Amino acid sequence: MANEKVAVNAEDASTSDAKARSFGSDMEAETTVRSSRSSAAISGIIAAGAALAAGEFAGAFTSPKPGPVTAVANRVVDNAPSWFVEFGKSVFGLSDKVALVVGTVILALAFGAGLGLASRKSRHFGTAGLAAFGMLGVIAIGTDAQGTWLTGLVVCSFAVVAGVLALNFLLHKSGTRENPSNQLNSSSESVFAGSKVGSATAGTGGSPTAHSRMQGRRSFLGWSAAFGLVAAAAAAGAQSIRSRSRTELARKAVEFDPSADEALAQTEVSSSLDEVASVPGITPLIVPNDDFYLIDTAIREPLVDIDTWVLEITGLVDEPISFSYQDLLDRAETTAPVTLSCVSNEVGGDLVGNAIWRGVPLADLLNEAGVKPQATQIASRSVDGWSCGFPTEAAFDGRTALVAVGMNGEALPIAHGFPARLVVSGLYGYVSATKWIKEIELTTIEDFDGYWIPRGWSKLGPVKTQSRVDTPSRGTELVLGEEIAIGGVAWAPNTGIEKVEVQTDEGQWREATLGESLGEDAWRQWYLPWTPTKPGRQFIRVRATDSDGETQTSDMTPPAPNGASGWHEVPVIVA
Ligand SMILES: Nc1nc2c(c(=O)[nH]1)N[C@H]1C(S)=C(S)[C@@H](COP(=O)(O)O)O[C@H]1N2
Ligand SMILES: [Mo]
């Protein structure tokens, strides 16, 4: 087939450009054969790459079942003679698994090149070869300890279909198998090109047909690059889906001793008995993980590999020290309810939540490293390069300050900082609550500014006492003379809430009933019954007083630079 085409093209060349005839035709024939051979090989390599990528992509959705590449590599390890495995270890050391996977991929691509070349004889070679290639994958997945025959079949069918489509398309584009209309096209183009390029290029082998062939080749290379890129993107996508599920699996495998989570269990029982907690529309005392607010600069949540992750304590310490995830889990015996809030929270906003955190007291870990007296700031950094810092006292003044690994009875969700984060009562998140933490550095106040400080936020971030009306919500229509429950939450972490007052009808402030106290670090729910007696637009206002007797200021300030202040006010319509 390819040779036929060469003959036709050589004829085109001789008719359209007399000068090229004697010299060019032989050269042309050779060039075409060579380029179609390399094109066929490239087509085959890319088709094999497309098949691998499609297989890995489909396989990623069956995680933790292995994809075709991993499964084949696993079979190699299972069946290889021990000298081969030992050899791999001695040459590649800890990267021997990577080397095995890379080797498998290279072999597959080489096989693809062979299929591409064979396809010049008949397209059936390519299809049959890719199908055989797929069968190998099915067998590898089917016989894998973690795989099944069904997933193997489905995943590898995807791979084979993608490979066959890519191969045929690219072979078609490479011109090794042009249809008559294309030939017509290319010969008329030759005539046009011949008049333009003419004799100037003839002597260098750039005859008119060579020119059109160049165009064809360029478009073939363009398509090849496009297929290669898509395959690479699919493979990278597969990798990210897999590593997400690997991290998720590692996370799910963590179990905390439920008896130690008694505090949590007890609060659940008692708060459900609590009249305040049962006010419809009130925020739960403990916010479920899936509902807990999320704030961070990460475009994609960092996926941490707990096998290699460590938390380092560095800087102004007697001895730098590091802890593995297991080290932290082994010592994570402290559970504490702490209300975490964001400095960006507007008055009445929802960037605040209360959870039961489990972890290791920060002071314990710091004491192990030995904090030097000149260390006035505790800086921390995350795996994704975020940082913050707060005064060293906060770790030692008796408040709750944890390297947390658990949230509401389970391992920290990925979005909330798995494997570990800081939780410090009474400090806004932006100065204290590093998620995906990797380093705690003891330094001085002057020597380090966390991520948000040069961006205009205050160096110190103590949480301002706040209260919020959850129900009724803004603009609710209330019925004149009909009693409702006004309810919400109030927080003054590290100090505690002593009193919540509510104002209605522009009248006296009345004290609300407080819900159960989980301790000074946690918010309190509150409620107050109210029967509207005046029609029209009415305001409900709330203010809290902390355990030091300080009442929230009525001065309204925006969140920047150190947190919003003012009383939350909710307009309602009474009719
Ligand atoms: N790594 C990292 N940790 C971070 C942040 C961040 O951007 N990156 N944001 C902080 C801020 S501003 C807040 S308010 C809290 C929010 O924690 P949450 O998302 O678990 O509610 O995380 C803190 N920890
Ligand atoms: Mo924040």
Image (tube, helix red, strand yellow):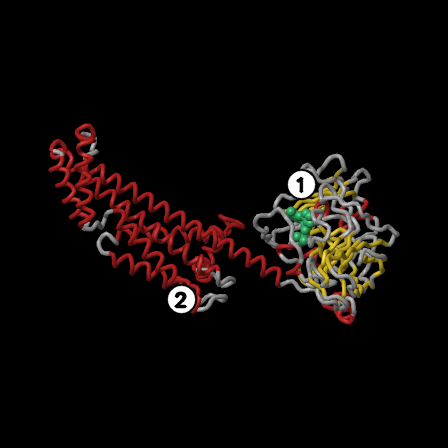
**Which part of the image, by quadrant, shows the C terminus?**
bottom right
Q: Are marks 2 and 1 in contact (CB under 8 Å)?
A: no
Residue type at tag 2: Leu
- Pick whichever, 407 or 500, lies toward us: 500
In this rendering, the count of numbered labels is: 2
Q: Which mark is residue 451?
A: 1
Q: Image check: 461 left or right of 302? A: right
- Pick whichever, 490 or 248, lies toward us: 490
**Circle nearer the N terminus (2, 1):** 2
Is residue 433 in sight in this rendering? Answer: no
Q: Which mark is residue 512?
A: none
Q: Quadrant of residue 285?
A: bottom right
Write the residue at 40% across / 50% down.
230
SS type, badge 1: loop
How far from the left and from the top, in percent, is residue 392? 79, 43
Is residue 93 in sight in this rendering? Answer: yes
Write the residue at 30% across / 41% down.
218
Q: Image check: 400 left or right of 296? A: right
- The yes-or-no answer for disc 2 within 8 Å of ligand 1 is no
How far from the left and from the top, in percent, is residue 363? 79, 50
Position of residue 531 relative to residue 508, above or below, is below
Q: Which residue is mark 2?
A: 153
How far from the left and from the top, in percent, is residue 100? 46, 53
- Disc 1 packing (10 Å; few <14; some 14–19; many ≥20): some
Residue type at tag 1: Tyr
- Disc 2 packing (10 Å; few <14; some 14–19; many ≥20): some
Q: What's the distance in space between the residues labelled 2 and 1, CA to CA?
A: 49 Å
SS type, badge 2: helix
Q: Image check: 537 left or right of 142? A: right
Write the residue at 70% across / 43% down.
388
How far from the left and from the top, in percent, is residue 111? 33, 53
Position of residue 172 relative to residue 131, above or below, is above
